[in-house]
Image (spheres, helix red, strand yellow):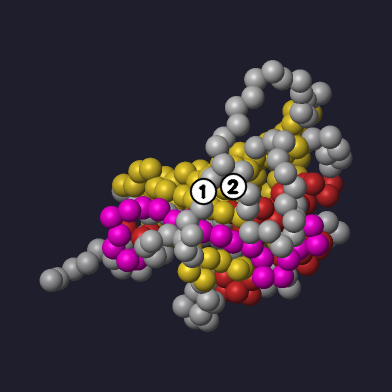
Amino acid sequence: MTYSDYEALVQSASTFSVGTVWSQGRSAFGGLTAALVLAHIESQEDLSGRDLCTINIHFCGPTLADEPCEFRHTVLSKGRSVMQVEGQLLQGGEVKTQIIACFGVQRFATLQITPPIKVFPEKSLQVPFIENMMPEFVQHLDMKYTSEHMPFSGSSEARVNGWVRFVNPPSAFTDAALVALIDAWPPAVLPMLERVAPSSSITWNIEFLNPRKALNTSDYIYYDCEAVQAAAGYAHTEAKIFNQDGQLIALSRQMVGVYEKKVTGV
């Protein structure tokens, strides 16, 4: 099933499973689970005239592939300007992915700060999907690295950047689809490691810039992320997301767990 298939499914069903072709290790791709919780909320609530402003995501546990997922949501507050909604993905009665989404109405304002247009690197490296060596979900994405250093290359720089879009374009480029693409990249700290080590996002915050230009379904987005601190098995990263024209459209922050093993004996 493509991303669009799952987004359409969550709009009509509150319980279904995610297939192994969207997995990363033992769990389903976190970007997909977060996107589906958001898509569930957007299909159930009248959000006319409201833009998605922020989304806070907690990955409370692995969402197992091919196991039933249940989607729920609760409106926490609804004012004239701002509406906040909590959404959850559950398996076996336990919360696996939880989000709080904030939607806002655009208001009159004289204050305006416009970020500068991003100038992108000229060279990029296409990422081929290699079965049994990459997470299964990568086969659904068209990714091009512009980073100088790949994960686990022993780099002195903790940075990941590049272009990404869906291999099978969605029928509409929704905010939920954008959430899924933002999470496609490995944590920015991984290029500094010299050995392969598992990692997983624990908390994730995205702020969406409004108003913003609508994306075409075949558009790439550009992701530029760096680690700002890492210690004791955790890393903190900050990212900027741009459209193809170089306009900043979102800001992303994550706390990531990195599970290195001690090396014994030399």
In the shown orientation, is residue 124 left or right of residue 244?
A: left
Query: What amino acid does circle 1 point to?
Result: Val
In the shown orientation, is residue 75 left or right of residue 132?
A: right
Q: Is residue 211 above or below residue 183?
A: above
- Quadrant where the C terminus sits is bottom left
SS for dot 1: loop
Q: Is residue 35 above or below residue 108?
A: below
Q: Are marks 2 and 1 in contact (CB under 8 Å)?
A: yes
**Residue farthest to the left, as pictured:** 266
In the shown orientation, is residue 58 left or right of residue 263?
A: right
Question: x%, y% of residue 27?
Answer: 56, 66
Residue 169 occupies which quadrant of the picture?
Answer: bottom right
Question: x%, y% of residue 3?
Answer: 72, 65
Label 2 and label 1: CA atoms lie apart by: 7 Å
Q: Is 135 inside the magenta-drawn segment?
A: no
The residue segment tinted magenta is 152-172
The residue pinned by badge 1 equals 119
The secondary structure that dominates the magenta segment is: loop
Query: What amino acid does circle 2 point to?
Result: Gly
On residue 246, the disc is 2
Q: Is residue 11 visible?
A: yes
Residue 205 occupies which quadrant of the picture?
Answer: top right
What residue is shown at x 40% (from left), y 53% (from top)?
159
SS for dot 2: loop
